[in-house]
Image (cartoon, rainbow, N blue to C red):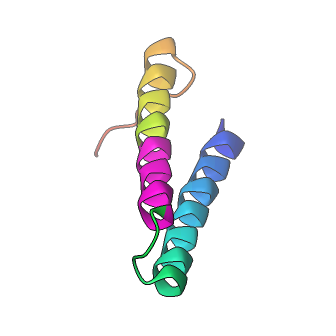
Amino acid sequence: MRAFVVLAFIGILASLASALVYLMRDKGSTNRTVNALTVRIGLSVALFLFVLFAHHMGWIESTGLR
């Protein structure tokens, strides 16, 4: 479980970094920056939904605030 979340975060950060590189290189002439940011949003939403699903299935448990 932990490895999946770490890999998802790495994917999100890689997509964000690639969007920055595309933004600097292309100067807004292509849609590669928008596509990279769209992938980042998709990965973030998928990770959030997976965490909700894992909590619902009992794979992870919330500890709450003390």
Is residue 36 covered in magenta? yes
Q: Is residue 2 above or below residue 51?
A: below
One can see residue 61 in this view = no
Q: Tell me: residue 6, above or below residue 19.
A: above
Q: Is residue 21 above or below residue 58?
A: below
Q: Position of residue 38 (x, y in %)?
A: 42, 51
Boundaries of the magenta span: 32-44
In the rendered image, the vertical position of residue 63 relative to residue 52, given as above or below: below
The residue furthest front is 29
* 62 relative position to 11: left or right: left
Q: Is 58 in the magenta?
A: no
Left or right, 41 with respect to 65, comes to right
User: Residue at 53% across / 28% down in the picture?
Assistant: 60
Residue 14: x, y in percent?
A: 61, 64
Counting from the top left corner in percent of width and height, residue 39 is at 50, 49
Residue 65, image x, y percentages? 28, 44
In which quadrant of the rendered view does residue 17 lie? bottom right
Residue 41 visible in rendering: yes
Extreme residue in the right direction: 3
